[in-house]
């Protein structure tokens, strides 16, 4: 069982920045990919950014150039960050961290963290 602990959400004005963190209780060798997703009220959960075990990154078009995903590896903990700059009101959502691990690609989700961008 992989535990994901998220932090860093909050309220920020448009144009501001926030950094989200997600600590996963897993070694890097078990990771297939980790990423951030978001869900606004009444909408589906959408991909924001992912980073593979090899470090390849992928971004939703709506955040490319404003958000940066990165990762720190420790022995039994992998921490993924999402640096969010030039935030817009439409970035308001609950942000979830997801980790895909193991041979069978099992998915684990964090509890979610609220990001609110005021205009």
Image (cartoon, rainbow, N blue to C red):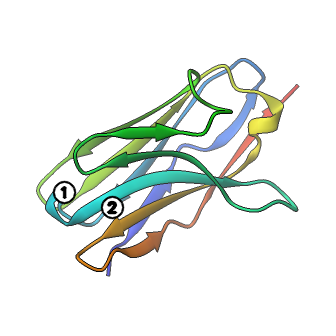
Q: What residue sits 24% from the left and 74% below the top?
A: 102
Residue 53 x, y percent position in the rendering: 24, 51
In terms of image quadrants, where is residue 111?
Answer: bottom right
Between 54 and 97, the one nearer to me in the picture: 54
Answer left or right for 113 relative to 32: right
In terms of image quadrants, where is residue 100?
Answer: bottom left
Between 60 and 77, the one nearer to me in the picture: 60
> Quick one: label 2, few (<14), some, or many (20+) residues within 10 Å?
many
Which part of the image, by quadrant, shows the N terminus? bottom left
86 lies above or below 51: above
Residue 67 x, y percent position in the rendering: 54, 29
Q: What residue sits 66% from the left and 53% below the top?
A: 38
Residue farthest along the left direction in this orientation: 75
In terms of image quadrants, where is residue 48?
Answer: top right
Answer left or right for 27 relative to 107: left
Tag 1 and tag 2, C-beta contact below 8 Å? no
Answer left or right for 77 relative to 115: left
Residue 84 x, y percent position in the rendering: 57, 29
Answer left or right for 79 relative to 28: right
Which part of the image, by quadrant, shows the C terminus? top right
Residue 34 x, y percent position in the rendering: 39, 55
Secondary element at image label 2: strand
44 lies above or below 106: above
6 lies above or below 14: below
Q: What residue sits 39% from the left and 63% below the top?
A: 99
Find disc 2 in the rendering and name its residue. 24
Q: What residue sits 27% from the left and 40% below the top?
A: 55
Q: Which mark is residue 54?
A: none
**Separation (CA) of disc 1 from disc 2:** 10 Å
> Quick one: label 1, few (<14), some, or many (20+) residues within 10 Å?
many
Find disc 1 in the rendering and name its residue. 28
Secondary element at image label 1: helix
């Amino acid at each position: 069982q992989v535990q994901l602990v998220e932090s860093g959400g909050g309220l920020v004005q448009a144009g501001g920045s926030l950094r989200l963190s997600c600590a996963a209780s897993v070694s890097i060798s078990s990771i297939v990919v980790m990423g951030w997703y978001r869900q606004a009220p009444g909408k589906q959960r959408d991909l924001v950014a992912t980073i593979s075990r090899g470090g390849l990154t992928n971004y939703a078009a709506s955040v490319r150039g404003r958000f940066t995903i990165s990762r720190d590896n420790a022995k039994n903990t992998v921490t993924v960050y999402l640096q969010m700059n030039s935030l817009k009101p439409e970035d308001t959502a609950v942000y979830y961290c997801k980790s895909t691990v193991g041979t069978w690609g099992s998915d684990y989700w964090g509890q979610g963290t609220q990001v609110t961008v005021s205009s």
